[in-house]
Image: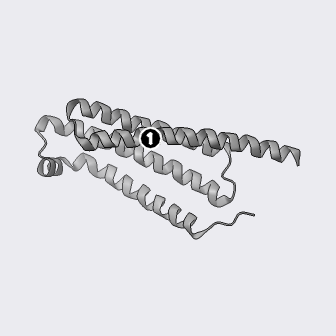
């Protein structure tokens, strides 16, 4: 039987903390107008689009963290190779793609190097999740086939 390690519990605790911090951050974004003007010197016409970009990408990140929470339940439960995790990887890939598209649209209006880096990171994250989805899907098929032969 597989034994859970301290690393599993620490990672789950970290995801939980990040999940609630992400929710708090998303709730704060609509009230961040003065902060955006003061720290980033944004012109008035860029504030609402920037708030939308931050809100949509924040919600997508919270959704990714939610999917990780779902996956940790199966990992700690001792059975990570289930179709539920395959679906979680697919949903995380879609959320990463949404963030990449949002920042591609943002770069048309206000390009920065950090925007380009965010796009690259989330495109790689999307591809990584799609690859892991296929690996887990194959592992689920092997596990099911093995369970049927015993």
Tell me which residue sits at (24%, 29%) in the image. Answer: 108
Query: For numbered disc 1, what is the local secondary structure?
Result: helix
Residue 29: x and y in percent read 27, 48
Q: In the displayed orientation, state which residue is furthest to the bottom.
A: 6
Is 10 drawn above or below residue 143 in the view shown? below
Left or right relative to 70: residue 101: left
Residue 95: x and y in percent read 45, 39
Left or right relative to 123: residue 49: left
Q: How is the image coloured?
A: one colour
To which quarter of the image does residue 18 belong? bottom left
Tell me which residue sits at (47%, 60%) in the image. Answer: 16
Q: Which residue is mark 1?
A: 124
To which quarter of the image does residue 73 belong? bottom right
Q: In the displayed orientation, state which residue is furthest to the right.
A: 150
Tell me which residue sits at (47%, 51%) in the image. Answer: 65
Quadrant holding the N terminus: bottom right
Residue 62: x and y in percent read 42, 48
Residue 104: x and y in percent read 31, 32
Left or right relative to 42: residue 16: right
């Amino acid at each position: 039987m597989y034994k859970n390690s301290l690393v599993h519990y620490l990672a789950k605790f970290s995801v939980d903390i990040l999940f609630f911090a992400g929710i708090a951050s998303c709730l704060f974004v609509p009230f961040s107008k003065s902060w955006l003007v003061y720290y980033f010197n944004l012109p008035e016409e860029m504030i609402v689009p920037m708030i939308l970009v931050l809100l949509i990408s924040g919600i997508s990140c919270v959704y990714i963290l939610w999917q990780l929470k779902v996956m940790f339940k199966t990992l700690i439960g001792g059975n990570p190779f289930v179709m539920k995790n395959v679906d979680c990887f697919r949903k995380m890939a879609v959320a990463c793609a949404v963030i990449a598209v949002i920042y591609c649209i943002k770069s048309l209006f206000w390009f920065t190097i950090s925007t380009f880096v965010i796009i690259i990171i989330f495109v790689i994250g999307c591809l990584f999740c799609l690859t892991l989805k296929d690996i887990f899907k194959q592992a689920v098929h092997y596990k099911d086939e093995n369970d049927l032969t015993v």
